[in-house]
Image: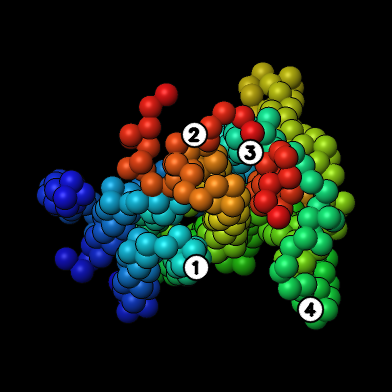
Amino acid sequence: MRSQTQRRVFLVAMAGLAAFLVWGMAGLPRFGTFAGAYSQFLNAHAVAQRAATNVVAAITFDYRGFDTMGEEFILFAAVVGVAILLRTQRDEEERSPTEEAEGRHAPAASNAVRALGLAMVGPIVVFGVYVVAHGHLSPGGGFQGGVVLATGALLVYLSGEYVTLRRVRPEHLIDAAESAGAGGYVAIGVLGLAMTGSFLENVLPLGRPGALLSAGIILPINAAVGLEVAAGFVLLLSEFLEQTLVLQPRGGGTP
Amino acid sequence: MIGHLPQLVAVWLFAVGLYGIVTSRNLVHMVICLSVAQSSTYVLLLSIGFRAGGTAPIFLDVPVGTRAVDPVVKALALTDVVVGATVTALLLALAVQAHKRHGTLDPEEFRSLRG
Amino acid sequence: MTVLLAVVLLGVAAAGTATVLTRDPLDQAVAASFFGLLLGVLFLVLQAPDVALSQITVGAVALPLMILLALAKIRRQEGTRSGQGAGSPPERPEGRR
């Protein structure tokens, strides 16, 4: 009964809030007629100023690079949080994944799945690197490319090869890669600070818009962010997988 | 009214997600409803910056000066999507540990546990 | 406001409602994946290809996977707990094993 009253009270309150929100939204300009001065200025001048044809990447990593650094550290903190939460507790122990795999009764992946999955890992990694490297030219960048790279590792697991996944992603290397990505961003900012006195100033040569090596520091920042996001997601994945497949209560658990 | 359809959809998604959170009996279900409520903000942001007849603000193959949509809100939404998913993963880890400690995923049960 | 945009917006609203109204978390993972895909399509129609790329990789692939892994772990914990003693109380287990 208490949940019924809870539901009713919520519906009444939500109706009030929704009415308020809709009244506020009605004051916005009509859909499709946005005329913000900042965005119009950027669309007209960003390519000339920053030699980056992707204006969104120029905003994210150059004009507002400081905010993106904060977002990247939110991601870093969340991954660290997951690693802490899912650490081996005192009443758990690790079981070798090979003997765990023998004990499980799940059907093994067929050879077709295994072959196709492993064959696609290469193209996915290449595609991820392409998305990261061309962030300042076409849609893409560190965040998207990093997630695509992490799905390459995911494919190895889905093809039924968790043991291979553990061998291929040594944990210390992933931790080091993630920290290197997060620290690399700050290092690039400090480089700008050292050379011109303002943090995250664009100090590398700007080049010609449309060329791969252009837009100054956007390319190194993309690489750092891509490294960090990819390592972060692989770490998240392995933490959850370890919980499911490897950890078990101390004392043998139940067969 | 139809001209404000995107904003209405955003408000609806937010309301629906909030309803799911309030009336949920399972922690994992609650986390997924939270991500639905989060996505309402992306819809709202991107619909505000839209300009009718505009193209994406990427001038690799179109000349500078072509009518394009607002790039600032896209920059906001882009990092938001990835970071939001990571925070959702953190909440899922919390749910797993809560179940390990208390044996239940029902938020109503947590209230009666002491110490 | 084209017909395509209106259709995709209504589809997103319907998928979001369906995701919330699905009570079982296992079914909800699939519904959330579909919702993420539709959201990616909406972002594409709103001329935001990079946001759509993020949303599809994250919301349709990475997030449902983590939900499924969390559920697998929880189900495994429940199996262990019920195997130790029938009807163990939902409070903290008695002392250290």
Circles 1 and 2, Cβ within 8 Å, touching? The answer is no
Which amino acid, mark 4?
Answer: Ser
Q: Which mark is residue B115?
A: none
Task: Classify 10 Å Cα crowding around label 3: few (below 14), some (14-19), many (20 and above).
Answer: some
Q: Which mark is residue C30?
A: 1
Identify the residue under disc 4.
A110
Residue lying farthest to the front in this orientation: C86
Question: Which chain does the residue under circle 4 lie in?
Answer: A
> Is residue C97 rendered to the left or right of residue A30?
right
* Residue A181 locus on image (x, y percent): 73, 37
Check the image and report above or below for A254 versus A194. below
The secondary structure type at the circle numbered 2 is loop
Which amino acid, mark 3?
Answer: Leu
- What separation in Å lies between label 1 and label 4 (alpha carbons)? 23 Å
Residue at (45%, 41%) from the top-left corner? C89
Q: Does residue A141 appear in the picture of this structure?
A: no
- What separation in Å lies between label 1 and label 2 (alpha carbons)? 32 Å
- What separation in Å lies between label 3 and label 4 (alpha carbons)? 31 Å
The secondary structure type at the circle numbered 4 is loop
Identify the residue under disc 3.
A86
* Residue A43 locus on image (x, y percent): 49, 52
Which amino acid, mark 1?
Answer: Val
- What separation in Å lies between label 1 and label 3 (alpha carbons)? 24 Å
Identify the residue under disc 2.
C92
Is disc 3 on the same chain as disc 2? Answer: no
